[in-house]
Image: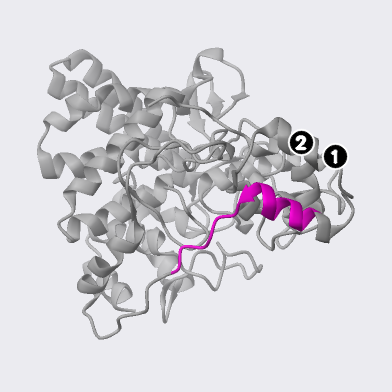
Amino acid sequence: MKLEIFYPEKAFPELYADVMRLHIFSDSKTFSDASLLSAVDEINSSYASIDHADPGQVTAFVREWFRIPELNRAPPALEALPIDHHIRSLWPHLIRPSDKPQYRSSLIPLPYPYVVPGGRFREIYYWDSYFTMLGLQLSGRADIIRDMIKNFGWQLDQFGHIPNGNRSYFLSRSQPPFFSLMINLLADIDGPEIYREYFPHLLREYSFWMDGEEHGSHTFRRVVKVNDDQFLNRYFDDSDTPRAESYAEDVELAGSGVAEAKAFYRHLKAACESGWDFSSRWLSIEKDLRSIATLDIIPVDLNALIYILERTIARAYLIKGDDEMSLEFEMKANKRALLIQNLLWNEEDGYFSDLLFKENKYGIPSLAMMYPLFAGIATPDQAKQTITFITEHFLKPGGWVTSNQYTGQQWDAPNGWAPLQWITYEGLKKYGADTLANEAAQR
């Protein structure tokens, strides 16, 4: 498949900015996902002849020259079905066939079928897909799991990383690195040869996240130097422009008192790479999104996931018969585990925390503290204290709350998110807190 990457915000910048400024669509993502009905030059030339300040003319122009995507409507709720049957009933609505190359669209066509979240989310998303695969496994759809992992492998071959989603405007960032967990899941289904098949892709994933380690500088892209030869990771984005999918909102917020717009945009996008967009985890001032400082934070969840990636690569080397490299990656993982146990452990309050490395202080408590338990990194005492802390501060009638900050951001109280419920459940069971895990699951 010949790959052609199309960036609508670059192809017709004046029209794009006007559509966003005039709020032609209530959701910026709608126009970012539209496909062209004619050539770029013809569209730009024709647009020059209308009044760019007239919302009616701009709206009519867009309707004439673009195919506007529709929302993926959810099927009617089938409340009478048991939950596993209900999940199976959703797959036909959410599985997409392999893509045909579209004429001038932000969509990056994938060669194999995949699952989308639905609604305004018309493309595959990286970290969501691991949890989707758990549902597919329950439904006996290993075929789709294989296809989705093939798509992620294809993206690693094409771009050197797995983008946030298969849109051109997502290429500058990734999402929490769950690829190694996907490989572990598929290996449980198809056997250990999966590690051989996806070995090059595991290394590419690792190289992407560790790009900069060899520079030896304090921070470079996603790498933060914490000691002479020790590194941890942060979320990042390679672009310092407004998000295409939230262009109007970003520009307006940047114009409302942000000191440096480019830095602000990069902090926003780095938070999107985390999947937690947005949370007071990333804010210097609790309820002010303009104070976002994601790049100045070493996130505990990210580093736990990279520890799992290092352990998975070690396992893959062992299966390939390279004991020396297997040991090297085990040592990398052990070194990272010690750093997490020491640098990202809030001894005073008894929980794992993000580190604001420029200020050398801990971030707010959030359910990300459960990732070191999920990964098996926590010592027994650290696990015990963390479990006590979340039970006292995070367990609510509906399950585990994301943080204990009420900021209005969706990744804060009073909201709980399904992936974090699962991470917490698995972390609790790994350290023997089965009764608590099951109680919270029932809630």
Q: Residue 162's quadrant in the figure?
A: top left
Q: What's the amino acid at mark 1?
A: Ala
Front residue (pair 216, 164): 164
- Residue at the extreme bottom of the image, as rendered: 80
| Tag 2 near tag 1, CB within 8 Å | yes
List the residue tagged with mark 2: 44
Residue 103 seen in render: yes
Question: The C terminus lies in which quarter of the figure?
Answer: bottom left
Q: Is 439 on the left-hand or right-hand side of 221?
A: left
Residue drawn 41% across and 70% down?
74
Q: Is residue 202 above or below residue 426?
A: above
Residues in magenta? 58-73
Asked if residue 89 lies in the magenta stretch, the reply is no
Tell me the quarter of the image containing the N terminus.
top left
Residue located 75% across and 51% down the image:
61
From the viewer's side, name the closer residue of 267 and 361: 267
Horizontal side of 432 relative to 336 (left or right) equals left
Distance from disc 2 to disc 1, alpha carbons, whole Å, reads 7 Å
Label 1 secondary element: loop
Q: Position of residue 414 (x, y in %)?
A: 54, 73
Q: Which residue is denoted by mark 1 in the rendering?
A: 48
In the visual, does 123 lie left or right of 8?
left
